[in-house]
Amino acid sequence: MDQQDILKRACELYVTGGSEAVSMRRLASDLGVTAPALYRHYASKEQILLDVVMEAFGLFTSYLTQALTGQTAAERLYLSGKGHLDFALQHPMLYEMLFIPAHALGVEEFPEQIKSRLASLSQFYDDRVRECMEAGLLQAQDPHEVSLTLWGHAHGMVSIYLRGCHPMDEEQFRAAYWASCGRVMQGIATADYATAMHEVTEHADITPRPPAPQPTVTT
């Protein structure tokens, strides 16, 4: 047994039964060790759960930062959305851990490490929106407010799916996710956005893609 084994089992117990389901005794029993063996790694279950949250943020960040390999602002925005979606669907338990309130973990507030992770995540989304505005792909507004809208939309869609509120298989959900993203973008994108994003997603594994840009007709 090592620290990763403890974190993995603690996450599984939390997602299926909440904070009450996680105890040092239960963890020791499930892992086939004695409680003192656990205490050599962690002083309390609250400390374990906070480390699970940090692990989740670390992995989520690795998915999102793949977006920085994009060659254009449009491609980086698309890859950010894809990273958010892929992480949530491939690691649903860890995704759930990202957004639980502090009191659910048995603490009054998150430690500075987690607050810093949240701030970095917010800044990452702000930067993607800001550079799209600078490239003329999004209407000039407050980047932070717009990124909050996009982040909230992505999280809301994923939460609806993970909780089974609108039953569908993964392929259907991916299609619904991208279609919904397209509807949201209609309210904040410029005329150049469709051209740029169509080029980015022309060979991407998403359905549906943004519509191909139509030629401007002048009279």
Image (tube, rainbow, N blue to C red):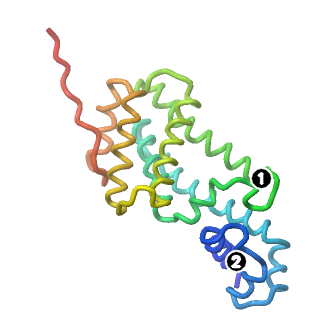
Q: Residue at x 31, y 45 (%)?
A: 201
Residue 146: where, in percent of width, then height?
A: 52, 31
Q: Residue at x 65, y 77 (%)?
A: 9
Q: Nearer the viewer, residue 72 or 208?
A: 208
Identify the amino acid type marked 1. Phe
Q: Residue at x 72, y 59 (%)?
A: 104
Count of number-bearing discs: 2
Sequence-first disc among 2 and 1: 2
Give yes or no for contact between labels 2 and 1 (Cβ–Cβ under 8 Å): no
Answer left or right for 46 relative to 188.
Answer: right
Q: Is residue 100 above or below residue 123?
A: below
The image quarter containing residue 189 is top left
Answer left or right for 126 relative to 49.
Answer: left
Residue 219: where, in percent of width, then height?
A: 14, 8
Q: Residue furthest left?
A: 219
Answer left or right for 218 relative to 59.
Answer: left
Crowd band around label 2 with a 10 angstrom C-alpha radius: few (<14), some (14–19), many (20+): many
Identify the amino acid type marked 2. Ile
Residue 215: where, in percent of width, then height?
A: 18, 24
- How far apart marks 2 and 1 lie (CA) works out to 20 Å
Crowd band around label 1 with a 10 angstrom C-alpha radius: few (<14), some (14–19), many (20+): some
Q: Residue furthest front?
A: 165
Q: Nearer the viewer, residue 121 or 175?
A: 175
- In the picture of the structure, the residue carrying the numbered disc 1 is 110
Label at residue 6 = 2
**Element at label 2:** helix
Q: Residue furthest top?
A: 219
Q: Nearer the viewer, residue 148 or 121?
A: 148
**Element at label 1:** loop
